[in-house]
């Protein structure tokens, strides 16, 4: 990583040095986040216009391609510029092309408030923008990344500490805003707006109550065992619900048993917008600790999330002050929590983390019963 950073700095410098013949204007907010992180940030964005003294139409969100297809609906009124974050970190010519486009934005202020971030992406994009005013949060700094972070932070006009680890991301966003505003802005429950469109009939029969299960994750270790999801599906069917399995095609945890026609396998068959449509009209969502879990909570859907201990409390569970009544988090505490997912207790990266596997089906069913009650 460090070798690549030194190589890419020349491209970054060339882009930053490009002259731009237009007035500096607006705020650039760099969000090199996954879907879940984007959701946790979204509500705090509504304070940016007042805090920075501009109209929301003058705020540009520089985000990730992974959620680009839903950005217009989730960020109405803002300018959106999404990039392929993986290519930006790997390919010099793509990086240079994107850096030129970022420089051409010519913002008056550039902002980055992520805590667990990659300097080679988020911080370098802030720097390349060439904004005369740069405000960054103090990130999590390890020995391997110290040089990169300290270089970019030395270029910032203001570095904002947002709390010691493991302060929750929602709280961090509001600590950041409160420091800049010079007044307390209290954390709020995550919420996103979404269209009312129902999922297509080929996905789920019209008028049928259903639950959505998300058994995948881009990290194998966070996948609560599929056998438990199948048992959960059977219990929900017995309760009168259809069950729809969702997820990206590359996150399939195994073969789904759809012998019972009320269990529907849509893994890899929906785009992100259709996935939101499915969750938005579901009676219940049960998910691993991954992006769709945060989406369903922000949509206001009754949600149960299976949580591991890698960085417990940073993203999930939500703090009580910002945990809505329809969100429940189920976990099995172990002495090795906060391992940052560097788990020494599994044989390979394809195994489930022990803290995730230890979550009992009865725990999840109990929260399902609490949320559904007698409502079907």
Image (cartoon, rainbow, N blue to C red):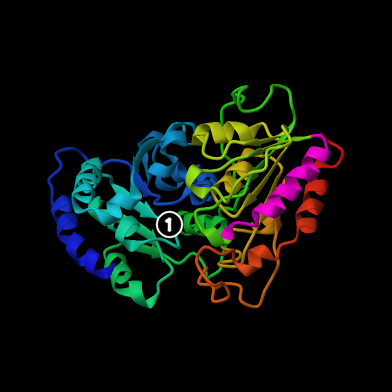
Q: Nearer the viewer, residue 329 or 206?
A: 206
Give me the residue at 59% from left, 47% from top. Answer: 294
Q: Is residue 273 above or below residue 34?
A: above
Q: Count every numbered label the image shows and give the total.
A: 1
Is label 1 in a helix, a strand or a loop? Answer: loop
Q: Is residue 204 above or below residue 343?
A: above
Is residue 223 in the magenta section? yes
Is residue 1 in the magenta section? no
- The magenta-colored residue range is 222-240
Q: Main secondary structure of the magenta part?
A: helix
Question: In the orientation shown, which residue stands out farthest toward the front?
Answer: 259
**Res 334 quadrant in image:** bottom right
* Quadrant housing the N terminus: bottom left
Residue 33, percent from left and from top: 43, 51
Residue 360, percent from left and from top: 75, 61
Q: Nearer the viewer, residue 44 or 145?
A: 145
Q: Is residue 39 above or below residue 114?
A: above
Residue 341, percent from left and from top: 52, 68
Q: Is residue 243 left or right of residue 294?
A: right
Q: Is residue 43 left or right of residue 66?
A: right
Residue 336, percent from left and from top: 61, 76
Give me the residue at 52% from left, 34% from top. Answer: 269
**Res 256 quadrant in image:** top right
Q: Which residue is mark 1?
A: 113
Q: Is residue 50 left or right of residue 95?
A: right
Give me the residue at 56% from left, 72% from top. Answer: 346
Question: In the orientation shown, which residue stands out farthest toward the right?
Answer: 374
Q: Is residue 61 left or right of residue 249?
A: left
């Amino acid at each position: 990583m460090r070798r690549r950073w030194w190589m890419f700095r020349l491209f970054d410098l060339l882009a930053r040095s490009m002259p731009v013949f237009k007035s500096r204007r607006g705020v650039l907010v760099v969000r090199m986040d996954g879907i879940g992180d984007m959701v946790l940030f979204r509500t705090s964005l509504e304070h940016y216009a007042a805090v920075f003294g501009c109209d929301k139409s003058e705020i540009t969100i520089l985000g990730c391609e992974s959620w680009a297809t839903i950005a217009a609906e989730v960020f109405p009124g803002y300018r959106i510029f999404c990039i392929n974050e993986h290519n930006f970190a790997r390919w010099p010519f793509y990086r240079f092309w994107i850096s030129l486009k970022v420089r051409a934005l010519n913002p008056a202020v550039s902002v980055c408030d992520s805590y667990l971030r990659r300097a080679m992406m988020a911080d370098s994009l802030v720097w390349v923008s060439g904004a005369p005013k740069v405000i960054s949060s103090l990130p999590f700094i390890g020995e391997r990344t110290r040089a990169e972070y300290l270089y970019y932070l030395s270029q910032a006009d203001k570095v904002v500490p947002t709390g010691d680890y493991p302060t929750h991301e929602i709280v961090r966003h509001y600590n950041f805003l409160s420091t800049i505003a010079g007044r307390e802005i209290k954390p709020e429950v995550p919420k996103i707006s979404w269209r009312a469109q129902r999922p297509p009939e080929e996905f789920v029969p019209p008028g049928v109550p259903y639950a959505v299960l998300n058994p995948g994750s881009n990290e194998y270790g966070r996948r609560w065992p599929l056998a438990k999801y199948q048992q959960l599906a059977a219990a929900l069917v017995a309760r009168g619900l259809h069950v729809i399995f969702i997820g990206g095609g590359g996150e399939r945890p195994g073969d789904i048993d759809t012998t019972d026609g009320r269990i529907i396998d849509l893994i890899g068959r929906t785009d992100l917008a259709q996935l939101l449509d499915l969750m938005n009209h579901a009676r219940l969502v049960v998910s691993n600790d991954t992006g769709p879990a945060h989406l369903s909570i922000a949509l206001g859907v009754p949600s149960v999330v299976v949580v591991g201990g890698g960085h417990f409390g940073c993203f999930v569970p939500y703090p009580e002050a910002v945990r809505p009544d329809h969100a429940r988090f189920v976990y099995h505490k172990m002495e090795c929590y906060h391992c940052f997912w560097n788990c020494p207790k599994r044989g390979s990266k394809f195994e489930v983390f022990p803290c995730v596997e230890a979550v009992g089906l009865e725990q999840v069913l109990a929260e399902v019963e609490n949320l559904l009650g007698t409502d079907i």
